[in-house]
Image (tube, rainbow, N blue to C red):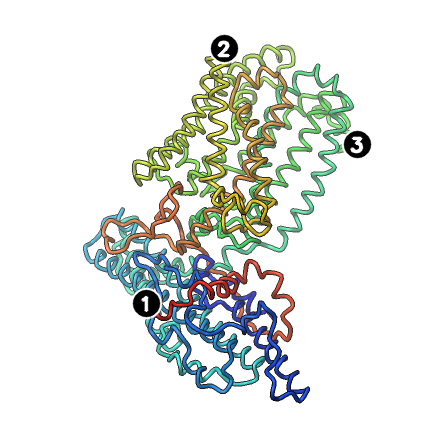
């Protein structure tokens, strides 16, 4: 049996969390009521009827008086919802205080506080539900009107996307109403159990619960909008199919098939369980591949160090080394990203919504953290064992592999070392096939999304720039070493240099010239793409922050150019210092949202978040402080990585591997905090559904973000997925497990108590 508080946490739309009935804070009030009743019963047991019960602890909420001013401060503040704001004056007068408790024999400060908060929370949830539903109605009416004007193929494509987003928003809103209704029923049931008097019917009658839109009696309104959306999508699907296939068949069977296919496609977009779950075998294979990687890594280290001098004299190893190094950095990046995905999932950061995963049945990147980790570890096993074969060829022990595989009956062709020189080729081709093959294997939807995103990045600024595009382009800026190595491999294997034993040094020099020319191109391209993306966003959205973000990448390009042209390295050093500090400042302030609390008086306060922000979801304060320090140190290595002559002057392939690994780790740390900050911004602005930008929808504007440093607008987002679990209830006789999350989940309760001393005259002002 699942506790309802945990079920509510799983099924709630986290971007709308502040509008849910605060179930856990209400349970904390019930704890105080139980304590108050226990002290009163103890006084009666001592036959001291004339004396008042002992006062509860100083932090007990029962000692406070009941009034609307006792509501949480962030409830009293205004809320951004669409174009308007929710304030206390927007809510009905009866929602500002529970009246039935005033004439009830069980009227105590704790009871009044409990029902005041519950009453206001229900009214607030109902107000948000009505406002959001009204926006959906206007949006649906506009789309229906536009469909009457015979839209063309391009307009139908936009209408289809807008209809899917609207349908997903309606599904989220339906779940929002159901969760709040269930929370009210559960908390009243729990109250009646611990307070030992029946209040459910009185409270429902007092607030006229059945007249609220979140109640089941009014579900026909949202069901009607949902049905209209389905009819609209079927019409869009049929019209689009006529454009795509010139299908003019209007028979009854064809119409029925179109309707069935359209509804299946539309409803699959809200089937979270179907698109986010992974096989039970995925964690198993992750463990198997990790177990195979460990001995393979030890084998590579042992063989490499035992015959280091001989390997240095063997040119064939250093020809193949860039291939292994480049692919290893890519696999390490993918593995670290899978760890980030799992971390985001544990912290309830909606990365799927932000990165536009699981959007439609045809195009969503339905790849879980375990599935991505399994792919990366499997390729890593392949890489390490082929590398060990290559090292064996270099130190003269390559025949050990043929003996281990074939015993005494070894074919003559396998005894030739040139046969084993094909192992890097097989590995490189296998890697490219895994990423770019068109077959319906190896998660084709995810690879399709990856290739489309890569195409949008490469052709910037002529393609769309959403959060996913610029986020992916930032990943490429950290893979300069891998890109140069793969370009080198593209020269080595088609030309057959790795097989030419006699002229291998001369051929390698030719390929080195090729890779040197391409190295400059791949050094410039990632930062050029990001520069173009920022300029496009600046022109389209008009955000001044995009102009300054473009300056950051312009400085990086200038640093690379000066490293090549400036022989004295003086101007390069100045440019590198300026670029490092500017990039570091942008990471900390704009990408991570830190340095918000700069009040020096709170520097030594353990509870204050000095130099951080108010909402921290990834870890403790120590994690953020260490990230700020490590990011600065790793930024220095990043400047060395993007400066070609500095690295080549050190003349070591191992250093390139080390610097590339450190940059991948820095980028993974950046990914963690960047997605967290974007999620915090979505929660602050209640952005849970993408508002598709259609020219004819002038009556609905997307919610404007308060942060001016975002790289994308709100209309670049896709809706979040709503997780659904089976409704199960469990009576909880104790509340010991509730205190462990008090700082995070009891935030509403803490502000509820804090606002008492600040809003004593609010009722008079109202």
Alpha carbons under labels 1 and 3: distance apart? 86 Å
Mark nearer the viewer, 1 or 3: 1
Alpha carbons under labels 1 and 2: distance apart? 69 Å
Name the secondary structure under disc 3.
loop
Q: Is residue 628 left or right of residue 546?
A: right
Give the residue displayed 61% in from the left and 66% down from the top.
738
Instruction: Residue 474: give x, y in percent of width and height.
Output: 47, 35
Q: Is residue 528 left or right of residue 539?
A: right
Residue 71 lies, with reference to residue 188, above or below; the image says above
Q: Is residue 227 visible?
A: no
Which label's residue is closer to the chain start, 3 or 2?
Answer: 3
What residue did someone put label 3 on?
Answer: 407
* Quadrant (top left, top right, bottom left, bottom right) of the C terminus: bottom left
Give the residue displayed 58% in from the left and 73% down from the top.
32
What residue did someone put label 1 on?
Answer: 89
- Are the residues flagged by discs 1 and 3 in contact, CB closer than 8 Å? no
Residue 544 lies, with reference to residue 764, above or below; the image says above
212, 308: nearer the viewer: 212
Instruction: Residue 636: give x, y in percent of width and height.
Output: 55, 27
Give the residue displayed 46% in from the left and 73% down from the top.
118
98, 228: nearer the viewer: 98
Give the residue displayed 41% in from the left and 30% down from the top.
529
Mark 2, residues whose alpha carbon is within 10 Å: few (<14), some, or many (≥20)? few
* Quadrant (top left, top right, bottom left, bottom right) of the N terminus: bottom right
704, 757: nearer the viewer: 757
Mark 1, residues whose alpha carbon is within 10 Å: few (<14), some, or many (≥20)? few
111, 451: nearer the viewer: 111
Indicate which disc residue 567 carries. 2
Q: Is residue 539 visible?
A: yes
């Amino acid at each position: 049996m699942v506790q309802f508080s945990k079920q509510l946490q799983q099924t709630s739309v986290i971007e709308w969390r502040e509008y849910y009935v605060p179930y856990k804070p209400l349970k904390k009030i019930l704890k105080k009521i139980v304590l108050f009743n226990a002290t009163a019963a103890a006084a009666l047991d001592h036959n001291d009827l004339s004396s008042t019960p002992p006062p509860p602890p100083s932090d007990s909420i029962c000692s406070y008086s009941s009034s609307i001013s006792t509501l949480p401060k962030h409830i009293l503040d205004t809320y951004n919802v669409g174009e308007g704001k929710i304030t206390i004056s927007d809510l009905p007068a009866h929602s500002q205080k529970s009246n039935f408790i005033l004439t009830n024999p069980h009227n105590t400060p704790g009871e009044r506080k409990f029902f005041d908060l519950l009453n206001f929370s229900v009214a607030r949830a109902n107000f948000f539900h009505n406002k959001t539903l009204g926006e959906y109605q206007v949006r649906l009416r506009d789309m229906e009107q536009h469909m009457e004007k015979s839209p063309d193929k391009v307009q139908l494509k936009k209408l289809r996307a807008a209809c899917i987003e609207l349908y997903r928003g309606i599904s989220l809103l339906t779940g929002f109403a159901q969760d709040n209704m269930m929370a009210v029923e559960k908390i009243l049931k729990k109250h009646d159990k611990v307070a030992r008097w029946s209040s459910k019917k009185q409270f429902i009658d007092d607030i006229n619960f059945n007249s609220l839109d979140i109640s089941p009696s009014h579900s026909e309104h949202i069901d009607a909008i949902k049905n209209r959306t389905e009819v609209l999508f079927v019409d869009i699907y049929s019209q689009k199919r006529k454009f795509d296939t010139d299908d003019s068949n209007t028979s009854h069977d064809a119409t029925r098939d179109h309707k069935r296919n359209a509804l299946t496609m539309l409803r699959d977009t809200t089937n979270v369980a179907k698109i986010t779950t992974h096989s039970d075998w995925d964690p198993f294979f992750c463990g198997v591949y990790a177990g195979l990687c460990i001995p393979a890594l030890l084998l590579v280290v042992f063989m490499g160090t035992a015959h280091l001098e001989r390997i240095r004299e063997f040119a064939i190893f250093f020809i193949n080394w860039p291939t292994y190094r480049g692919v290893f950095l890519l696999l390490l990046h993918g593995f670290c990203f899978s760890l980030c995905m799992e971390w985001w999932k544990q912290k309830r950061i909606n990365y799927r919504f932000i990165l536009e995963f699981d959007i439609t049945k045809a195009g969503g990147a339905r790849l879980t953290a375990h599935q991505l980790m399994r792919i990366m570890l499997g390729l890593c096993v392949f890489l390490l064992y082929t590398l060990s074969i290559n090292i064996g060829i270099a130190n003269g022990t390559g025949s050990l592999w043929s003996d281990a595989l074939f015993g005494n009956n070894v074919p003559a062709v396998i005894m030739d070392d040139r046969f084993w020189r094909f192992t890097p080729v097989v590995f490189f081709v296998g890697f490219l096939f895994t990423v770019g093959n068109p077959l319906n294997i190896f998660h084709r939807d995810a690879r399709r999304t990856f290739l489309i995103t890569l195409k949008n990045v490469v052709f910037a600024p002529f393609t769309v720039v959403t959060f996913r595009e610029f986020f992916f382009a930032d990943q490429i800026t950290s893979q300069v070493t891998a890109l140069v190595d793969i370009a080198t491999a593209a020269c080595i294997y088609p030309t057959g240099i790795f097989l030419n034993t006699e002229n291998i040094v001369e051929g390698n020099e030719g390929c080195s010239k090729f890779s040197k020319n391409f190295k400059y191109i791949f050094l410039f391209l990632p930062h050029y793409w990001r520069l173009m993306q920022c300029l496009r966003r600046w022109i389209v959205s008009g955000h001044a922050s995009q102009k300054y973000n473009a300056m950051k990448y312009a400085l990086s390009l200038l640093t690379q150019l000066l490293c090549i042209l400036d022989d004295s390295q003086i101007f390069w050093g100045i440019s590198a210092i300026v670029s490092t500090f500017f990039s570091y400042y942008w990471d900390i302030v704009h990408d991570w949202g830190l340095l918000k609390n700069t009040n020096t008086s709170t520097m030594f306060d353990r509870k204050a978040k000095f130099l951080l922000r108010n909402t921290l979801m990834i870890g403790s304060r120590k994690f953020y402080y260490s990230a700020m320090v490590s990011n600065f140190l790793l930024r220095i290595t990043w400047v060395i990585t993007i400066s070609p002559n500095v690295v080549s002057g050190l003349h070591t392939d191992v250093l390139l591997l080390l610097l590339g690994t450190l940059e991948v780790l820095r980028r993974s740390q950046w990914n963690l905090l960047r997605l967290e900050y974007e999620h915090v911004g979505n929660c602050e602005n209640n952005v849970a559904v993408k508002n598709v930008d259609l020219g004819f929808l002038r009556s609905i504007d997307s919610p404007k973000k308060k942060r001016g440093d975002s790289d994308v607008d709100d209309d670049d987002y896709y809706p979040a997925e709503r997780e659904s679990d089976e409704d199960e209830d469990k009576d909880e006789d104790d509340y010991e497990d509730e205190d462990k999350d008090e700082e995070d989940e009891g935030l509403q309760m803490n502000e509820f108590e804090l606002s008492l001393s600040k809003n004593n005259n609010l009722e008079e002002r109202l």
